[in-house]
Amino acid sequence: MNFFTKLTVVTMSALSVFSCADGNDAPLYKDASKPVEKRVEDLLSRMTLEEKAGQMNQFVGIEHIRANEAHLTPEDLKTNTAQAYYPGFPADTIEQWTKEGLIGSFLHVLTIEEANYLQELAMQSRLQIPIMFGIDAIHGNCNCPDNTAYPTSIGLASSFNPEMAYRIARQTASEMRAMNMHWTFNPNVEVARDARWGRCGETFGEDPYLVSVMGVESVKGYQGDMNQDDVLACVKHFVGGSQPMNGTNGSPTDLSERTIREVFFPPFKAGVEAGALSLMTAHNELNGIPCHSNEWLMTDVLRGEWNFKGFVVSDWMDIEHIHDLHATAENIKEAVYQSIMAGMDLHMHGIYWNEAVCELVREGRIPESRIDESVRRILDIKFRLGLFEQPFADPQTTMQVRLCDEHRQTALEAARQGIVLLKNDGILPLDEKKYKKVLVTGINADDHNIMGDWTAPQKPENCVTILEGLRMVSPQTDFVFVDQGWNPQEMSRAKVNEAVAKASKCDLNIVVAGEHMFRGNWTKKTCGEDTDRSDLDLVGLQQEMIERIYATGVPTVVVLVTGRPLGVQWIADNVPALLNAWEPGMYGGQAVAEILYGKVNPSAKLPITIPRSAGQIQMIYNHKPSQYFHPYVVTESTPLYPFGYGLSYTSYEYSELVLSADRIAADGTVDVSVNVTNTGKVAGEEIVQMYLRDRFSQVTRPVKELKDFTRVSLAPGETKTVTFTITPDKLMFLDKKMKPIVEAGEFIVMVGSSSADEDLLKASFHVK
């Protein structure tokens, strides 16, 4: 009998024993008919201090430990945030601690077999408290094999489709529960304001309103009614890490309280109000205080102001970094003390936590009642998710949910809606009769990297590359493929020369360029977690190859696969067509091909500004009025492509912007209507955007702020009237004393197809 066969037998046996216990003899906390609050208190009263500390600690999975202890040194662990093990503490020790009830949670458990096995070990403990498995299900549960890989968040945000965010989160929850996973470390609701930062692709972009809306729908989709069909959402990373001082992940952040409250807090507050029951603090220090020991963030704001009811979890070893990186604690034990007393509830991840917590309580430095607060919050979630009644998942039915037809269709639809057409000089959509022989080349032309960061290797049949998509969509076309490899840093000049030579003999050239995000090649990535850039240029020989292929005189199309904005000004100025696919997921290749050949009309808009170069950073649409009072010399002060921008194969005309009132009270509302007409020859979907500006105010306000949007389907020649309602919360800002206010005066309403002034109709009204 092999390991997994034995595992299944043991697991199902344990499930039978656990579920058939005599209810008359079972303690109250095992009685599902009792209120959750009473079950929590009953269980808490039975727990030792060591067991409580264990519930507050998370470990990486045993297979993860075994895989990494074979090739990583203890020194490697200090800067590696993807792999881990515990020197001196082998997997056997972790298994024993699980049996003793000293571990409450695991992450980096990637198979249903291992999850069930660890759960079976927990069922051998004194109190049989089930394990809660956390996973980085960032765009589907595809950090595990054999799960649906949706587009990453930046592509999802490009759809401006909150319903799609909800649907993907709902489906992700189903696939997670089918694997015995209960907690996703998502959504990432940081407001991305530095394109050098490698994690832009994990976010919903640069606008607080858009990030809030997409984050809220994700939370609702994951958590549902918080029962056996749902998973726990985690809004992260609290806060400011998306505007790092030098563009690198975890570097210091210095922000005014006004900027924190007006730009960075709103998506987190919206997530809490939507019911999110876990929150992760950020790697960085904020204004000199590490977020992981920041009492103002975790206690004063999160619990005091926002009434957060869930638990706070640390990020990867960041409590330890209070000591060994930020140096605001003299040792690990002091770091644990500072973090818990500031409001931390659960530790990711490590072996010395339990010991430090117990010592601090026995020394009287941390009251056991403070520990009880955290454990209550954690147990509450475990009861709500039904883990005490259903600690296992069924290996026999798991694949009936994962990668099912409905989920695959959603992945394809989301990819179609999230790919942004940035430039088209009339070459697109491609004419199959005109372009019979087409060169396809580039690092992302035939690579699973299109699925994006936070994706495990998937089976070939579960990913359509761009080359495969082209051959699928246009089977009669002769596609000539020149493989450039997957690593932009190690491109072969001989292969570039081959592509250039063949380009001149084709009717059309398609170059699929961009970045490499695949986590399996951790040290070779150019984008993604902990992969930050000092520039926004194409890496390696990519730019040279594009210029040489373009110089052949054969029409050329460039497709970008990337998790961050890239400063591709030369391409924008010269190449006739440019498509930004972001990280489009498992069916990204099909979606790209459908758009290139006009089977799908592109509709996506940019959720983040694309700068011309890193030298323009910070380049955001909602800047203050004085930001470009003195423009740059030599180079442009405008972005390469503005927030909200995206082309279509049809054209739209905006007209008759009408306000329902020109004067309202501070607590009043005003309706804004505009006519949108499809003036082209094909059906399309337009993303209509509404921006506001407070014309004169007691503190400086952005030149414009997105306050609403909607997707509108229009047939050729069709006109629809779109109406938005401006409510007081859309007019509110913080006054000189940091108090929310709706100020009297003129407000400018702007409605159109992007944030660029030339794309907006304008009107104004006054608040009395």
Image (cartoon, grey):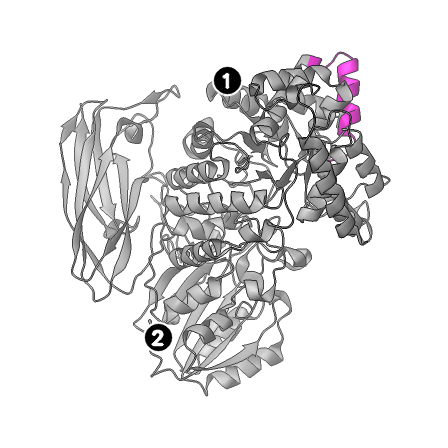
Classed neighbour count for the residue bearing mark 1: other residues with Cα under 10 Å, few (<14), some (14–19), many (≥20): few
x and y, in percent, of residue 556 in the image: 41, 76
Residue 669 in which image quadrant: top left
- Viewer-nearest residue: 235 or 528: 235
Name the residue carrying label 1.
304
Q: Determine whether the residue tagged by mark 1 lies in a helix, strand or loop.
A: helix
Quadrant in which the C terminus appears: top left
* Magenta stretch encompasses residue 146: no
Q: Determine whether the residue tagged by mark 2 lies in a helix, strand or loop.
A: loop
Classed neighbour count for the residue bearing mark 2: other residues with Cα under 10 Å, few (<14), some (14–19), many (≥20): some
Q: Is mark 1 in CB contact (under 8 Å) with mark 2?
A: no
Residue 580 in which image quadrant: bottom left
Residue 335 can be seen, yes or no: no
Name the residue carrying label 2.
430
- Give amino acid for label 1: Gly
Q: Is residue 267 left or right of residue 292?
A: left
Start and end of the magenta stretch? 350-368
Q: Is residue 614 left or right of residue 664?
A: right
x and y, in percent, of residue 395 in the image: 65, 49
Query: What residue appears at the point 86 percent right and 40 percent down from the top-left corner?
Result: 88
Q: Earlier in the sequence, mark 1 or mark 2?
A: 1
- Viewer-nearest residue: 645 or 19: 19
- Viewer-nearest residue: 157 or 297: 157
x and y, in percent, of residue 574 in the image: 38, 71
x and y, in percent, of residue 424 in the image: 33, 68
Q: Is residue 491 left or right of residue 709?
A: right
Residue 531 bears which disc, if any? none
- Give amino acid for label 2: Leu
Q: Is residue 517 above or below residue 157?
A: below
Q: Is residue 727 left or right of residue 162?
A: left
C-alpha span from label 1 to label 2:
57 Å
